[in-house]
Image (cartoon, helix red, strand yellow):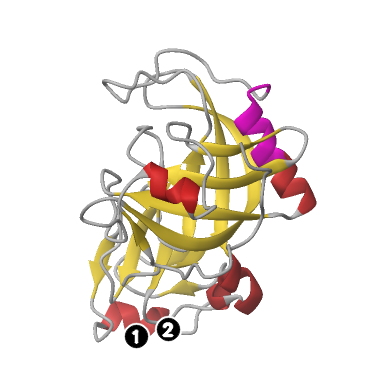
Amino acid sequence: MADIFFGTPVGIREEQCFASRKELIEADLHRYTVHGIDGNGNEGASAIVLSDGYEDDEDWGDYIIYTGHGGNDSSSKKQVDHQSWDSPGNKGLVVSQQRQLPVRVIRGFKHKSKLSPISGYKYGGLYRVVDHWEDRGKSGYIICRFKLVKEEILEKDYTASVGNGVMVLLKSPGRDSKWFSIGVDAPRAQRISSESKMAQLLTNKKVGDTIDFGNGFEILEIRKYLSK
C-alpha cells in the first residue's frame, strides 16, 4: 500500500469523476476499496468517502457533519453498536483537526446529495476538520461526529453575514429553531426566495441579530451552501 498523502494529487481537479474505488486508488485520492476513512491515529486522515453508509451523515455542501467509523450494519445502514475514538479512522480525523491537515472529500453515487455523481465517485475538494464530538445517533448508539468545512470557506469567511446562497438557523419565540435557505435548495432547510420580504430583512444581518417578521426571529447560525 502506498504511503499516506495529504492534499490534492498532481493532475487531479475538483469535481473530477472516477468510475470505481480502484480508480480512486490509482489517482492517489483514497487507498482503500471499502473503508470510508483513509488514515490512522499516528499520521492523521487524508481522505473520506461519502457513500450513504451512515444514517447520521449530513452534507451541506461546504459544511459536512460526518459520522465516524464503526458499529454500522452495511445492509441496513443503521447503527447496531457504539463507536469508539480508538478506531484508527476516528483517531486519524482527530489528529487531522489537531494538526490542521487537509482532508480530501469524495462523494459516491449512493450518497444523497445534489453534489453526488450519477455513477461512480466525484472528488469534492479539500476540507478541514474544525470540530469533533460524541453524540447519540438516530438508532440510539454513541457515535463519533466530525464537522468538516471546505478550505476556501475557511479562508474567505463567507458566513459573516446573510446573503443569497446561504442557510440561516432562526429561532422564533416559543418554537424550535429551524433552518432556512435563501435562493438555494439545501437539505433539511426551508427555501425562501431571495426576493421575498423575509430574505430582504435577513440580508446583511449577522449571528445574534433579530428581524421583525411574523413573531420575530433571532439568527443563531449562518452557513454558506455550495450548490452546483
Residue drawn at point x = 27 percent, y = 83 percent: 197
Residue 95 percent coordinates (x, y): 74, 41
With 160 as the anchor, is 179 left or right in this view? Answer: left
Which residue was labeled with disc 2?
203
Q: Tag 2: residue type?
A: Thr
Q: Is residue 89 magenta?
A: yes
Q: Is residue 171 something that shows in the picture?
A: no
Q: For numbered disc 1, what is the local secondary structure?
A: helix
Front one among 33 and 222: 33
CB atoms at circles 2 and 1 under 8 Å apart? yes
Cα separation, mark 2 vs mark 1, equals: 5 Å
Number of the label disc, if any, that sits on residue 190:
none
Residue drawn at point x = 58 percent, y = 73 percent: 152
Q: Is residue 162 magenta?
A: no
Quadrant location, the C terminus: bottom left
For mark 1, does the 10 Å Cα neighbourhood hold few (<14), some (14 to 19), or many (20 or more) residues? Answer: some
With 119 as the anchor, is 125 left or right in this view? Answer: right
Q: Which residues are magenta?
A: 86-94
Residue 186 percent coordinates (x, y): 30, 61
Q: Tag 1: residue type?
A: Gln
Residue drawn at point x = 40 percent, y = 55 percent: 173
Q: For numbered disc 2, what is the local secondary structure?
A: loop
The answer to whether residue 166 is above or below residue 109 is below
Residue drawn at point x = 67 percent, y = 45 percent: 4
Which residue was labeled with disc 1?
200
Snapshot quadrant of residue 212: bottom left
Residue 5 percent coordinates (x, y): 66, 51
Residue 49 percent coordinates (x, y): 44, 44
The answer to whether residue 59 is above or below residue 35 is below
Front one among 11 and 150: 11
Quadrant location, the N terminus: top right
